[in-house]
Image: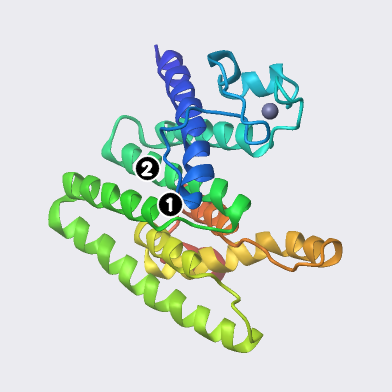
Amino acid sequence: MQIFIYIMIFAFGLVLGSFFNVIGYRVPKHESIVFPASHCPKCKHKLKTLDLIPVFSYLFLGGKCRYCKKKISVIYPIIELLTAFLYVLSYYLYGPTINFLISITFSSVVAITIASDIRYMVIDDWVLIIGGLIILVLGYIDGGLPKVGDLLLNAGISFAMILIIKIAADYSFKKEAMGGGDVKLMTLIGALVTYKMSIIVLCLSAFIAFPYAIYIYFSKDEHLLPLGPFLCISGLIIFFLGLGFDDLMMIMAK
Ligand SMILES: [Zn+2]
């Protein structure tokens, strides 16, 4: 029975992941997420149901459009699998609780953000706002006003701290080192992992991004690196580990 629930959650994650690809692809371009129906971004050919099965269609078609044979971005199946994996992990960690719903909401925001930030270097405000509101409502159901207050306090302090770091970094690099979208994303992450840990998330993301930053520096002319996906990955790691600042200090002291 338990395995059946996991399979259902995984399938649900794949389908929603496929939808998150559409949101991440269309919303930054201010296109409707419903119309026109799914089509190949290269030849505009309308896609049939058989072309739209998450992951399997990509594998079956060998990563190419059925009609124009141009390559389909590998971002699509990656976002689908990532969403499914995060949903299953959420259920494994939290079971059928409100925390599970908070966790899959956060995972969904992360999946959409990675999809749009990799493509356009854009983190959509609406994705963060809607995700944030859902998390506040779930927080209220779980722990009433004190929990909502706690989430808002951590969001507010994280926002202020990350904004100061952004201003300092922009000033010292003499250009925009961190986007406004990154600051807003960190506000949401900070609400969930606490404001103290938001600084740890930022440090961890710089650490993870470092090899990639070097690769970009030597391989391309444009030294632009979307920070969002790295913030998302480190935010997820800290969130799922459930590691508090005091726990971390205890580990460091040993
Ligand atoms: Zn095509």
Q: Determine the secondary structure under disc 1.
A: loop
Q: List x then y, in percent, for residue 235.
A: 50, 55
Q: List x then y, in percent, for residue 97.
A: 28, 35
- Residue type at mark 2 is Thr
For ligand 1, the image quadrant comes to top right
Please say if 57 is above or below 213. Answer: above
Question: Mark 2, mark 1: which one is toward the viewer?
Answer: 2
Quick one: label 2 or label 1, which is nearer the N terminus?
A: 2
- Residue type at mark 1 is Gly
Position of the N terminus, as image quadrant, is top left
> Total marks drawn?
2
Q: Determine the secondary structure under disc 2.
A: helix
Which residue is at the front of the view, 88 or 136?
Answer: 136
Q: Residue at x 45, y 50 (%)?
A: 30
Q: Residue at x 53, y 33 (%)?
A: 85
Which residue is at the front of the view, 28 or 241?
Answer: 28
Residue at the right extreme, as displayed:
218
Quarter residue 191 falls in: bottom left
* Residue 254 visible in image: no
Q: Is mark 2 within 8 Å of ligand 1?
A: no
From the viewer's perspective, is 28 left or right of 141? right
Please say if 35 is above or below 110. Answer: above
Q: List x then y, in percent, for residue 68.
A: 74, 25
Which residue in the protein does label 1 denote?
242
For label 1, count other residues whose C-alpha is less than 10 Å away and answer few (under 14), some (14-19) or many (20+): few
Disc 2 to disc 1, how far (Cα)?
A: 16 Å
Q: List x then y, in percent, for residue 239.
A: 45, 52
Which residue in the protein does label 2 denote?
105
* Residue 149 visible in image: yes
